[in-house]
Image (cartoon, rainbow, N blue to C red):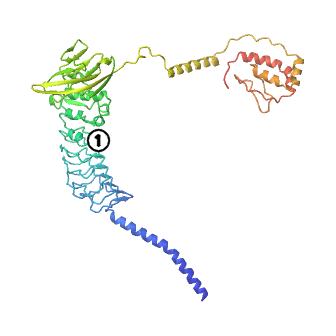
Amino acid sequence: AAVRFAGGIMLAAVLQRAQWPVVVLMVCVRLSAVRGAACPPRCLCTADILSCPALDLDRVPAALPAYAATLDLNHNRIQQLEPGAFQGLLQLEVLRLAHNQLSAIRPGAFRNSSGRLRHLDLSSNQLLVLKQSDFQELAALEELLLFNNRIKHVESTALSGLTGLRKAYLSHNRLTNFPFFSIRTDGHRQLTLLDLSSNRLPKLPLADISGLPPALQEGLYLHNNSLVCDCAMFSLFRLWDQKGFASVRFFRQEHVCLVAGVQRSGISFFLHQRYFEPCNMTATPQQEASVSVKAGAPLLLHCVTSLSGRGAVFFWLTPQLEYVAPPGNNGSIRMFANGSLAMAAPQERDSGIYVCVAQVRRLNDSREVNVTVLPRPATDATEPFNTGFTTLLGCVVSLLLVLVYLYLTPCRCPPWPRPRPLAATAQSQGKEGGAGSAQSSILTPTPPASTEGPGRKVSSNKHVVFLEPIREQQNGRLGAESQQRAGETDSYMSVFSDTPIMLP
């Protein structure tokens, strides 16, 4: 009975220990079944990525796992986004819907979805119009891809809710205008890239574009449009080219315009600059509110007002309250018909506020330009060598001298006759333990055949400049061997005098 009782206790203990793996296995199976049920058919669900590309889907799947942070629905046949299509996706950050057949985005399509959506790809679809209700719920959106659609119109408030937008791609569409003023007034302070290339824009609202932040102007791509050749646009692109903007630097040949609007008369703004030579007198280029120039350098100021290009009459007021009208005053200041003011060699006294006034009948408008003339450095005329250049020159000269010293063979001079050392001197040197002889061997230019220290050897064919001091371990052998090696010393002298000196 006792044995049976003990065996029962051991069996119970074993079963109790075996229950934990079984329980863990059952929980894992149950969780995997739940996750598998939440994943749409034929889709791939891994970690926080839900991928359903090229499945011939005609709508967004109804049941989507709530843990998805990236949803890929590219290359399907989805025609429109219904209200609440992405409801419950509270972790969604990346949504890809490229290469579908989207023609409409219903109001509330992104309602109750993630407030953290950063990347939205709607490229290569069939969208026609961008409305205010399309992206209202996407305040955290940073990148919006809409290229290669059929967009003809963008409402002025279509992007008003995207306050966190950084990059917007609308190239390869059918746009004939774009509300630049809405970007300036709707608080898109983080927007640094706006791609409107390969559209059908005939003209550009230069006043609105000039009011955009400099960072956005640098990232504004306008090449491959149907722009009608105009001096104002030529001046704008030339100014961007002078500033080195990437939008012009990387697409110089694609910045073209049409002469009189004829499609087959496209010319390049930068390859056919002779066509735009008259623009120097009639153009209305861009002008910054503050300008700095060195004393003596030429300066050109432009009069850009709301009346420019309407046959206005211009004049300027200098900081000294001098009235300047075409053609200018005394040759030092010239003024053109478009209101531009040219100063040949401004000085520090010419700094101040310059006011341009444009008049059309009873209307007038003005523009102020703050000019700062920087003093010319006193060391411009006779600038001495700086420290870095002087140091470099000294190093080069030293290197040349070392090379000359190392590789130019000295003249072959007859060996200087050296008297044989006396025996008494050798014996006295041997009795002193070789200390003085060791020091004299250091000073002599003749390399010894071998050193007296243990483990120290110097080859007879190795030419050195300096020798390390020899340790005082010699005994009477140095004096005894001095007479024996006197002849060898003379031979070394002749070899050493005719051999170039090299560093070890």
Local crowd at mark 1 within 10 Å, few (<14), some, or many (≥20)? some
Check disc 1 and report its element: helix, strand or loop: loop
Residue 378: give x, y in percent of width and height.
41, 16
Is 133 placed above or below 499 here?
A: below
Q: Which quadrant would the N terminus be assigned to in this image?
A: bottom right
Give the percent coordinates (x, y) of residue 456.
76, 31
Residue 172 makes an appearance in the image: no
Q: Residue at x 79, y 27 (%)?
A: 451
Q: Is residue 208 above or below residue 310?
A: below
Q: Is residue 312 above or below residue 81?
A: above
In which quadrant is the C terminus drawn? top right
**Which quadrant of the structure image shows residue 153?**
top left
Residue ranking furthest to the front: 320
Between 44 and 202, the one nearer to me in the picture = 202
- Which residue, as the protein is rendered here, is positioned at the far left? 361
Q: Position of residue 297 (x, y in %)?
A: 32, 18
**Closest to the observer, 483 or 325:** 325
Q: Does residue 49 appear left or right of residue 199 in this picture?
A: right
Is residue 107 something that shows in the picture?
yes
Q: Is residue 54 or residue 501 the one in the foreground?
A: 501
Figure check: 247 above or below 87: above
Q: Amino acid at mark 1?
A: Arg
Give the x, y percent position of residue 171. Answer: 25, 41
Which residue is identified by label 1? 189
| Residue drawn at x 61%, y 87% as measured from the top left | 2
Give left or right: position of 352 versus 152.
right
Quarter-wise, where is residue 333 in the image?
top left
Going by the picture, which residue comes out furthest to the bottom? 1
Q: Is residue 246 left or right of residue 280?
A: right
